[in-house]
Structure formats: structure tokens, C-alpha cells
Image: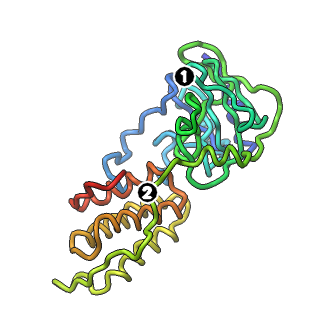
Amino acid sequence: MTDAGPLLSAALALADEGLPVFLLGRTKRPVANCPTCPTDDPGHDRATCGHLTCHGFYAATADPDRIRAMHEIVRGGLLAIRTGAASGLAVIDIDPRNGGALVPELMPPTRCVATGDGGWHLYYRYPGGPLAKNLDHRGHPGVDVKADGGYVVAPPSIHPSTRRPYRLVGDRAAIEMSPPLIAACRPPEAPPAVSRPATLTPVTSGGLISDPAALLAAHLRAVNRAPTGRRRVTLYGAARGVARMVAAGAISEADAYAALYAAGQRAEQSHYNITTAITGGFRAEAVPIEGVAA
């Protein structure tokens, strides 16, 4: 187990670089949420929860006082850095045990960490936009991409299985991803944005929807205008509203999904966050969304 002094010092040093950090349990997994978190409420915003150690990487912070307080609560854990837009980092995680290998033509030298299980973490500046979870689709097994919705274990954490430390290799700074690497990290495909005007049917029954186009635009505009930290929950709320439009027959299920997905992409949400927000919103309104890729 890493001594408390070095781990806390490393956490504070990373925070001094502006990187949001948090502490994992002893098995590289986030610690459990506190009992007061309404985890069953899909409207609960994990990003603004405010509790010290709840919701995994959402607890990451660069505030030294919060880091010290977190360290007092989570003893014997591992240090982690939140990746993606929050930190400005995208990390290439190479795992030789699963066939991962450095690909020099894709991966220029940058800040590098040797992991405790014989792999490497290559730190690059986050390029923005959706990134794939791994490079399997590019013929590079054993290479994961840690960006939005992810985190990496940081030195001097001790790997729970091998008992070897994570350690910084060299003193390079994180650099921009090369264009070939960015291209390789883009998802192989994503549900397309609406390629034709959505089929909107004026509905006047009960006076509930008099102008479907305006109502759809309002829902999508709310997502576009949502501040960072509120985008996923705003997309969920928009999905509930659009689900009611589907139930009223004002828009087709497929067009609704495509419009919401495109709004989620513009809000720079991950594929996982987009699909779970949409399907969760439809489920909350008891509106089926079968037959749509999620």
C-alpha cells in the first residue's frame, strides 16, 4: 500500500497542474456513494452532486482542501485523474496482456506512465468531440481510449494485483494528438443526425401540441444552451418531452431519436451518455423506443 504522504503529495501536485483528481478504492474501482445520494433518481445530477466522494470521477477536483478531506476519508486507495474535457486529457491505455502495443506512426512521444501491470498510459491533450472507447475497430486490440466518462490510475498508486507502482517515465509534457491518432480514435460510426426534416404531425387532440416543430426546437435548444455539468440531465429532460411528442403521434420514434442524438453530439456528450439519457427519458414516460440502435 502506498504511503499516505506520497499519494497525497502526488494528488496535490496534479491539482496544481489544474488536473481534477479523486481517490479510488483498493481495487481500481470508485468508492461507494454515500447513503444520502438519490441514486435511483434519474434526474439526480451526478456532476453537481457536491458530495466529497460520490459518483466516481464526478468527485474529481483540483481543490487542495477537498483533496485533503477526500484523502482523510478514503484510506489505502489509488489516485486517479479524470479524463476528457474536464482535465483536457485523452489517455491512450496500452495493455500488452490483451495484445496492446505502441504504434509509433499513430502515437508520438508524450507524457507517459508505466502502469503497475506492465502497460503504458500515453497522455495527450483532449482533441474534443466523440472518441471511441478502444482501437479494436482500427485493428489495434488491447488499446483503450480514456476520455469523457473515464479516468486513469496515476502514480504512485500500487496496482492491486501485481503490487507494482504506477510510475512516470521521463519528463515529457502532454502534447496534441497527431491527426492520424485523432482519426483512429474517432468512433467507427454513430447514429446519424437527422438527414431529412423530421416528420412532424400537427396534433390538436386535447390542445396538447399545437406546433410540434416549435416544441421540438425548444427541447433541442434547451440541450444546446445547457451549461457544462448540466448537459446530460438536460438531454434526459428533453428526451422525456420528446417522448411525449412520440406518444401523441407528433413525431416518429426514429426521427425523435435522431434529433436528440444530434443534440447530444453538439453538446459534446459521449455515446453512452447520449443513449442512456434518451432511453431513460423514454422509459420514464413509458414510451417504447424499440428498434432504434442504442
Q: What is the spatial separation of the Cα atoms under label 1 and label 2, in whole angstroms? A: 29 Å
Q: Earlier in the sequence, mark 1 or mark 2?
A: 1
Pointer 1 residue: 98
Residue positioned most to the front: 139
- Secondary structure type for disc 2: loop
Residue positioned most to the left: 206
- Secondary structure type for disc 1: helix
Q: Position of residue 191 (x, y in %)?
A: 43, 57
Q: Position of residue 256 (x, y in %)?
A: 34, 67
Residue drawn at the location 32% of the way across and 81% of the way down: 212
Q: Is residue 155 above or below residue 243?
A: above
The front one of 94 and 44 is 94
The front one of 28 and 170 is 170
Q: Is residue 133 left or right of residue 243?
A: right
The front one of 268 and 16 is 268
Q: Position of residue 217 (x, y in %)?
A: 42, 77
**What is the quadrant of residue 122 in the picture?**
top right
Residue drawn at the location 68% of the way across and 43% of the way down: 181
**Dot 1 amino acid type:** Asn
Task: Categorize mark 1 by other alpha carbons within 10 Å: few (<14), some (14-19), many (20+).
Answer: few
Task: Categorize mark 2 by other alpha carbons within 10 Å: few (<14), some (14-19), many (20+).
Answer: few
Residue drawn at the location 36% of the way across and 74% of the way down: 198
Q: Are marks 1 and 2 in contact (CB under 8 Å)?
A: no
Tell me the number on the disc at residue 191: 2
**What is the quadrant of residue 69 in the picture?**
top right
Residue drawn at the location 59% of the way across and 44% of the way down: 147
Q: Position of residue 36 (x, y in %)?
A: 37, 44
